Image: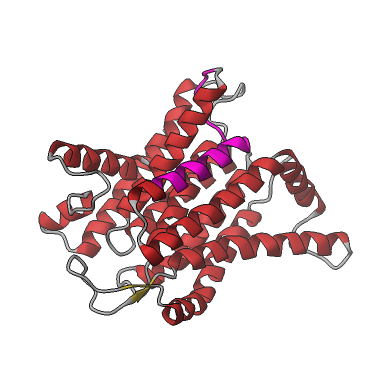
Amino acid sequence: MPFPLNVYLYALLGAALTTALTMPLWTAWCRRTGTVDDPGRCKIHSQPVPLSGGLAVMTGLIIPLLAGAVLALAFRSGVGSFLDSKTIAQFQHGFSRRSIELGGIFFGAIGMLLLGFWDDRVELKPGIKFLGQFLIATAVAACGVRITLFVPNLLFHYLITVLWIVMLVNAFNFMDNMNGLCAGLGAIGAWYFGLIAAGDGDYLVAAIAFLVAGSLAGFLPWNFPKGKVFLGDAGSHLVGYLLAVLAILPHFYTKAHPNVFGVLIPLLVLAVPLADLVSVVLLRWQIGQPFWVGDNNHLSHRLVRAGCTPTGAVLAIWLLAAAAGALAFV
């Protein structure tokens, strides 16, 4: 049954508009509660910057989802809807078939957001933060969101899934070092996962991916090129988690498309944040520095030292990520 492409457009634009419109509300709340990033020795801003990005991005995901549910109910009541009966039936089938997974994904997103928000407020010790990431990732895996890699062993599925989610959360947390970098990479990755899922007819995954891409796109004007608001750890945790899950949900290997190399697609889409994470961790290990202690040896910092402006460095990394993701279609 063909799926109407305008639904993806509704998801993309609805999420972007919701994030952009709710940003001032969350920004005012963050200023009132002192949830801000204060100036410091290693920071370029001279005034406190609200850490409202993650909260607005989450709102951009939730409100369009709720609006879609209301429209579906209105259609069933004879009020009318943007969605036809066949489309609603497809979504109902998808939600019923993957209800436990979707519930786990939703609560995992809330968990990562709250963990990051807690870190924004009190600056958690690394051990506590990693424990929180591990517990949330394990709970999500228990809901059925798991990587298998053709290995028929449940323990392996849990281990590789938890490792993947924790790794992506920290990769995007590491990439949140210049205005627009983390959110832009997240939007690019979500956009590619949406295109891939839509091309394979996986409409539910595609809709979620376009919601993520749209919500991050709605945040970017507030953060790039000038950082009026920041994602904060709440936002970077959320972005990394969502991209990790979007890499797990699609069926890259099926009987219809029996290409074992399909499992490499997520690695291509997420090549830039993964490569940056690996290079930085290895460098810190070589000099005897704990890998969780920040420094200025990320790809973005190296480009600035090579002569790029911060804005130019971010644009160059976006372009690199877009090129790597394009290889996934090849």
In percent of width and height, residue 121 lies at 40, 66
Residue 243 seen: yes
Q: Quadrant of residue 67?
A: bottom right
Q: Quick one: which residue is furthest to the right in this view? A: 78
In this view, the residue in front, 198 or 211, is: 211
State the image coordinates of residue 166 (x, y, percent, origin top left): 42, 42
Q: Is residue 80 magenta?
A: no
Residue 76 vs residue 60, the one in the foreground = 60
Q: Main secondary structure of the magenta part?
A: helix
Which corner quadrant holds the C terminus?
top left
Residue 329 is at least partly visible in this image: no
Q: Which residues are magenta?
A: 129-151
Judged left or right of residue 63, residue 16 is left
For the point 63% across and 52% down, which residue is it?
A: 5
Judged left or right of residue 112, residue 309 is left
Residue 110 location (% of width, % of height): 55, 56
Q: Is residue 90 above or below residue 163?
A: below
Query: Between residues 299 and 82, which one lies in front from this camera angle?
Result: 299
> Which residue is found at the position 35% from the left and 52% from the top?
173
Residue 144 belongs to magenta span: yes
**Residue 35 lies in what quarter of the image?**
bottom left
